[in-house]
Image: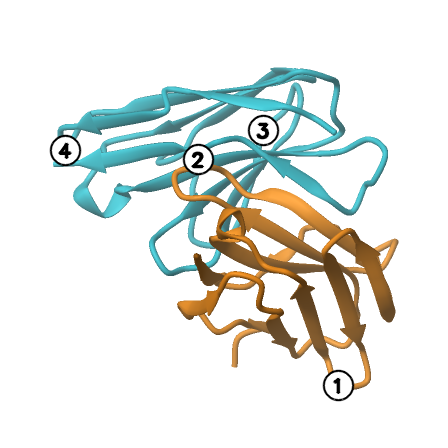
Amino acid sequence: SAVISQKPSRDICQRGTSLTIQCQVDSQVTMMFWYRQQPGQSLTLIATANQGSEATYESGFVIDKFPISRPNLTFSTLTVSNMSPEDSSIYLCSARALEYQETQYFGPGTRLLVL
Amino acid sequence: QKEVEQDPGPLSVPEGAIVSLNCTYSNSAFQYFMWYRQYSRKGPELLMYTYSSGNKEDGRFTAQVDKSSKYISLFIRDSQPSDSATYLCAMSLTSGGSYIPTFGRGTSLIVHP
């Protein structure tokens, strides 16, 4: 399995500002993902973080709002830009295991509150 | 209709009870089925993983897939207060297709002493 850490674990931000969330995996993984989880809702995939190239965004998410980087096989960042209260959510980093390509492991999440 | 339906609960049971958690789905192409457990203020952790139909057992946990009915279940025997968490089902397509899983909303389970 892969152990995933995220920083920060939580933050309170003012509207109009940006926050960058870091994700570190303790081993090389094939793919990394960013999800959003809102109370009572299923996990929503924001984008797939591709190493050395632009992330692949899901419908409803755009690069200008959620720029993503993945400079190597074990590290990725997600930035939530020009935040509004609607961006208040839990943001989860996820990575696909090498041994079981169909399953994913998750970080502890970053709890974001935008005032 | 959502691709994956899961009752959010909460489901409250006494300690020692047998718990049944369920999901239904609409896409018959799903072949890989997973259950994740998420404790409060933590990320989801993979609990069970099954391929295609049938049962899989791991300690007190049994995952069951009925593809003909598009229905999956997770059974917890001798439930403990430490099992109190949200359980999310997830499923993904066959090899060659997308491995991006589709998640249910999660069922909140409360096991009281």
**C-alpha separation, residue under disc 4 versus residue under disc 1:** 47 Å
Please name the residue that numbered disc 2 is placed on.
A63
**C-alpha separation, residue under disc 1 versus residue under disc 2:** 39 Å
Q: Amino acid at mark 4?
A: Arg
Relative vertical location of residue A69 with respect to residue B91 in this rendering, above or below = above
Q: Amino acid at mark 2?
A: Ile
What is the drawing colour of chain A?
A: cyan
The residue carrying pointer 1 sits among few (fewer than 14), some (14 to 19) or many (20 or more) residues within 10 Å by Cα, namely few
Among all residues in the image, which is located at the extreme bottom? Answer: B69
Residue beneath the point at 53% across and 75% down: B2
Relative vertical location of residue B4 with respect to residue B82 in this rendering, above or below = below
- Subunit ID for the residue under disc 3: A
Q: Secondary structure at mark 2?
A: loop
Q: Are marks 4 and 1 in contact (CB under 8 Å)?
A: no
What is the drawing colour of chain B?
A: orange
The residue carrying pointer 2 sits among few (fewer than 14), some (14 to 19) or many (20 or more) residues within 10 Å by Cα, namely some
Q: Position of residue B23 (x, y in %)?
A: 61, 73
Q: Are marks 1 and 2 in contact (CB under 8 Å)?
A: no
**C-alpha separation, residue under disc 4 versus residue under disc 3:** 26 Å
Mark nearest the camera among 4 and 3 is 4
Residue beneath the point at 43% across and 57% down: B113
Residue beneath the point at 19% across and 40% down: A84
Q: Position of residue A88 (x, y in %)?
A: 26, 42
Disc assigned to residue B69:
1
Please name the residue that numbered disc 3 is placed on.
A54
Marks 4 and 2, the one that precedes in the sequence? 4
Residue beneath the point at 47% across and 66% down: B14
Marks 2 and 3, the one that precedes in the sequence? 3
